Image (cartoon, rainbow, N blue to C red):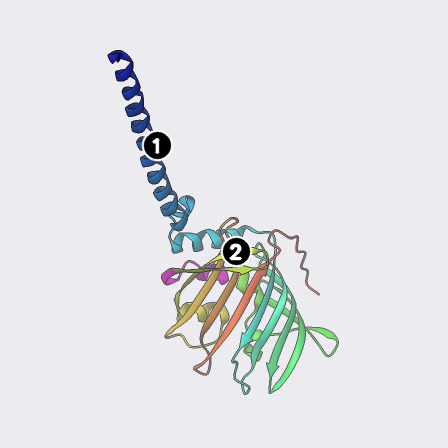
Amino acid sequence: MSIPGATRGYGGGIMRRRSLLASVAVLAVAGGLTGCTSSSGPKPTDAAQTPTQLLAKARDTMNATSGVHVDMVGKDIPKDTNAVLSAKGDATPATPAWQGNVNLQFNGTALQVPVVAIKDDMWAQIFGSEQKIDPAKYKVPNPAGFFDKEHGLGSLLGKVTDAKFGDEKRVGKVIVQTVSGSISAAEVHSVFSIGPSTGKYDFTFGVDESTNQLLTMTINGPFYSNANASYDVSFDSYGQTVDIKAP
C-alpha cells in the first residue's frame, strides 16, 4: 500500500537537494574562475597607477628624505677620456650635499678621490690635503648637484617619455617594479654636465612600491664623445642622518 503524501515528500527532498548542490557547484566554479582572474591580474591597489605616477612618487620620496646612500658604477667608458668611473657615498637633498669616494679616470690614470660637495662648492683630497676644486676643470659633475630637488637626479624622474612598466626584479630582500623610458639629452646634460645636448638617453628605474623609494637606476647614452656608456646607480638607507660639513 503506497502513501502518496510520503512519496511526494521524499521526491521533493531529492529535488531540493539536487537544486542546492547544483547552485553550490555553479558558485564554486564561478568563484574559482574569479580567483584565477584576480591572481593573474594587477594588484587592486596598483590597478590605476601609471608608470609616470609611480616615478612621481619616487621623486617626492627622494626629495623628502633626510639622507640616502648612493653607489654608482660606470660601464663601457672610453679609456681616453676624463670621467667618473664609480662613486660611493652619502647624500642629503635638503642642502644639497654629498660626501664619499669618487673613482676618476684622469689623463689615463685611475684615481680614488675622497670628495665633499655642498651646493656649488666641491673639495677633493688630492695628495693628502683637501683642496677646493672646479669640477668643470676635470670635466666631472658636482655630485651635490645630483640631489638638488629642482635640477638633480630626482628631477629626471618627472621628464621620462614613453614610460612603460617592465618586469619585477629582486634587489636585496626587496622586489622592485621596473619602469623604462627615455629622457632628452638636454635634460641629462643639465644634471651631469657632460655629454651632448641633442638626442636621448635610455633609462630603467627600479621602485619599491611599498615605500615609493627609487632603489635602482640605469642610464645608457652618449656620455663621452658620442660613445655610448652607462651608469648603474643604486640607492639605499633612505632616512639616514647625514651631517656633511665643509673641510
Q: Quadrant of residue 44?
A: top left
Depth order, front residue of 65/162: 162
Decide if residue 242 is on the left or right side of residue 162: right
With respect to residue 53, does 104 lie above or below?
below
Q: Residue at x 60, y 63 (%)?
A: 70
Q: x and y percent of residue 202 in the render? A: 42, 70
Q: Quadrant of residue 144?
A: bottom right
With respect to residue 193, does 164 lie above or below?
above
Taking the magenta stretch, the answer to whether it contains residue 242 is no
Q: x and y percent of residue 21 in the render? A: 34, 30
Mark 2, mark 1: which one is toward the viewer?
1
- The kind of residue tagged 2 is Ile
Q: Secondary structure at mark 2?
A: strand
Decide if residue 85 is on the left or right side of residue 198: right
Depth order, front residue of 188/37: 37
Query: Is there any visible trace of residue 152 in the rendered image?
Result: no
Q: x and y percent of residue 133 in the render? A: 63, 74
Residue at far right of view: 128
Q: Which mark is residue 175?
A: 2
Residue at far left of view: 4
Which residue matches tag 1? 24
Q: CA distance from mark 2 to mark 1?
A: 39 Å
* Circle count: 2
- The kind of residue tagged 1 is Val
